[in-house]
Amino acid sequence: MKKNIFLSTTLLLVTFQFNLKAQIYHLNSPDKQLSAVIEITDDKKLTYRLSYKGTPVLENSRLGYRFQNGEEFPNKEWKLVQEKYSKENNKWYPIWGKRAVVPEKYNQLQLLLKNEQNKNQATEQILFECRLYNEGLAFRYNIMEGREVKANCELTQFKFASDPTAWFYNGERENYGPILVSNVNEIRPANVTLKVNDHIFLNIHEADLTEGDPLQLKSGKGEKSFEVASSPGTFGYLKKGGKSAWRVIMVEETPGELTDSHLLELLNPEPVGDFSWVKPGVAVWDWRINGAQWDGFSYAMDYPSWVRMVDFAAEQGFNYLVLDANWYGPEFAAESDPVTGEKAKDVKRLINYGKEKGVGIWLYLNDVGGRKYSIENTLKQYGDWGAAGVKYGFMNGSPEEKNLWTQKITKLCAENHLLVDFHDNPVHPYGQLRTWPNAVTREFCHAQLDAHRVFSPSTFCTSVFVNMVAGPLDMNNGMFDLRQGKTTRIDENQPVPATLAAEAARTLIVFSGVTILPDIPEYYRKYPSLLDFISAQKMPWKESRTLAGEIGEYIVMMRQNRDGKLLVGAATNEQARTILLPLDFLEKGKYVVEITEDGKDAHYLKNRETIAESLKIVTRKDTIQLNLAPGGGACLLFRKGDTSSK
């Protein structure tokens, strides 16, 4: 893909030597379904509007900046000196993602504006860059020339033509919404999914956030609009060579198409260097097994338990074991050295044992240890030990500081061939997995087993259409110890509000470069069909598609593994549901489908561990009926051939 912004295929190039009144530019998506109008008004404001299939989506909305001295970009001092239309028709082949091949097709408009008077020694040239994909609109500001200047705010608006219903990411709480935009009346963090009508769904977020605050949106009471509330630039300063994040309005006909999109990744630069070592996959985890008991053995966060988990991972073809907090001492204690702490010798021994078994070991690192000790030395040491990844927890600082620190850690991890997972209110994903394929997941939600105060089946069925649009999530689904009453687990012994079938289905539905399983081997072995379903989740995915779903209600997800097998997971909210699933996503020929769904009288609160199993021979012309209990789910594993081909 061409890198220089002025080297794309030029359709129109004009240099202006005089001032016009209103200047209007039209941009269509490659499939002609989305239309954007960019306008420099007669009073020199920069605006845009957007429509889908002729239906107005966004009305005239402001673009630009307001500087500390009160002046704005653009105003009468700014002149358009160059315009250019261009287009791109390419393909992206990700190291890993929701699919093996991603079309990269868009039409682009670039407007170069110059501050000819520059009385205040402010920025002199800004390039406004706008792209229209079939999946949505994206635009950003590039500071081409000029001195560093303080910008009080970004003027970008999103003025809706109607009053859509919104669902927001809400930190480690249930999603905020559904709520009409006109009733928001506060500042909310991105991202947000919006329902315009039954056939138009939006998501507003950002991509390629190199500097400035992570995107926040503000809305006043009665206003059908958002404004950007976050500070631009590095700590509010615009300087030569700087660029804003892409402001992204994704537009699709269903919420599932938003979830399936790779648009945010496409707006990030291609990776530099070799990332062929990055291997997504399934992991087991030591945090939730702590205290579990089985046949006289008590699991703990110690070497004997770790060996049992590695053996189980190797047996099932799982890629990793994640070691969580306190392996090097109390995680919040300043004296806990993340290289020489309590169990460092055991950890090094475990890494070598894991290599013999083909299982990589992830190491937890708390922000206290990450900042008190040299982060460069710590991550280099983990790489030298042969660790597979780092789970980084409880990062401190302002949102912008956290983003810069996240970028640094991600880069250092890549240099040391370490995957990375950010937890505990991380900076939101913005398409990093393209530039940094080692950034495989983050807790841009509340991990399920930490979240009994907020997590519910409807929370799950909302976050997959909101949070997951932003990028891969580490939600830690897949708990199989669902007995009534408290468990023997030390950290969190409350029962999970789900059924067995739902828990297994959620491991597939949630997109992540590492699917982290929270339970002990023995509970998975109790249910062979569900264990088969999880073991078949061999990434990278060849294809992913949301087959059906409604925000807060239910979701049906299909993914094709690297071996070509098709898996389908379905999950519902607190309501029982019957789903008729057409199998037209199959290729021609016969398939054997192994179905594991909720058993008789299953319920996410009082009868969690009952399942029903069946085997059918089907073709793409068939329809399967799925019966989901309240809070329940279903798992389908398709294999091409007859019943003997398993």
Image (tube, rainbow, N blue to C red):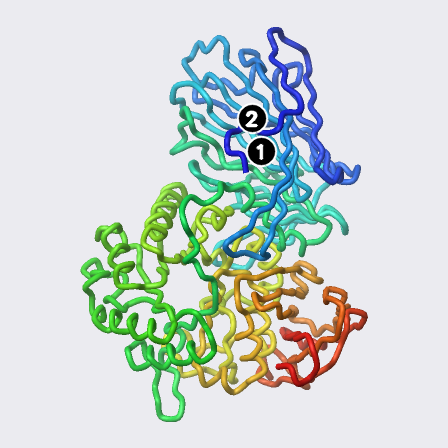
Question: Residue 19: percent from the left, percent from the top?
Answer: 63, 8
Quadrant position of the N terminus in the picture? top right
The residue that label 1 is drawn on is 139
Residue at 44% x, 55% y is: 276
Position of residue 214 relative to residue 590, above or below, is above
Kindly identify the amino acid type of the residue bearing the numbered disc 1. Phe
Question: Residue 429: percent from the left, percent from the top?
Answer: 49, 49
Does any portion of residue 447 appear in the rendered image? Answer: no
Kindly identify the amino acid type of the residue bearing the numbered disc 2. Phe
SS type, badge 1: strand
- Quadrant of residue 293 within the rendered picture: bottom left
Question: Residue 147: percent from the left, percent from the top?
Answer: 39, 19
The residue that label 2 is drawn on is 128
- Quadrant of residue 43 within the rendered picture: top right
Between 406 and 227, the one nearer to me in the picture: 406
Tag 1 and tag 2, C-beta contact below 8 Å: yes
Gap in angstroms between the C-alphas marked 1 and 2? 7 Å
Between 43 and 531, the one nearer to me in the picture: 531
